[in-house]
Image (spheres, rainbow, N blue to C red):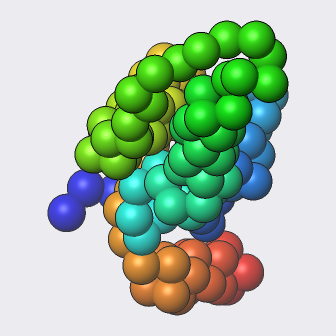
Amino acid sequence: MSEYRYDVVVLGGGIGGYTAAIRAAQLGKTVAVVERDKLGGTCLHQGCIPSKSLLRSAEVYATMINSEEYGITAANVELHFDRVLGRKQRIVDQLHQGLQFLMKKIRLRFIMAMVESSVLLFFRRAAELFQ
């Protein structure tokens, strides 16, 4: 198994984690991000971003349904929920790919692992420094 040395190891690849990792890299540190799932965390993949995408689609649909209030007749307005979900997924995928590109560009290492085991390893390594 290869051994790596980092100045900073960030636990969690959500908005707070990757922002901290990017800043540490900008300051010249060698950085790794440990995340149990996809880079971007809950906000990008299940929470904030998907919710906002779905809300925007709902807003456009409601506007179209009520277009008469704006002096516009929109006949046969239909909701295709599969397309709404497809749009949401394209947005999430695009942002995720952009984040992955940025991490590679600034040479951050992404480690997919459970945080508990990573924390244990960290403490063992830290303890070695004090011996």
Q: Is residue 60 visible?
A: no
**Residue found 78% across the figure and 34% down from its top:** 23
- Residue 43 percent across, percent down from the top left: 62, 56
Compare residues 56 and 131 and report the one nearer the observer. 56
Q: Residue at x 61, y 53 (%)?
A: 51
Q: Quadrant of residue 28?
A: top right
Q: Is residue 15 above or below residue 41?
A: above
Side of 65 relative to 68 (left or right): left
Horizontal and vertical percent position of residue 6? 57, 49
Spot occupied by residue 14 in the image (x, y as percentages of width and height): 62, 56
Quadrant that contains the C terminus: bottom right
Q: Nearer the viewer, residue 2 or 33?
A: 33
- Residue 125 is situated, as x and y percent measured from the top left of the image, at 55, 76
| Vertical position of residue 79 compared to residue 63: above or below | below
* The one of 60 and 108 positioned closer to us in this rendering: 60
Residue at left offset 44%, top offset 30%: 77
Residue reaching furthest to the left = 1
Q: For the N terminus, which image quadrant? A: bottom left
Count of numbered circles on the image: 0
User: What's the residue at 48%, 54% (across, down)?
Assistant: 45
Q: Is residue 125 visible?
A: yes
Left-right relation of 10 to 77? right
Q: Quadrant of residue 113?
A: bottom left
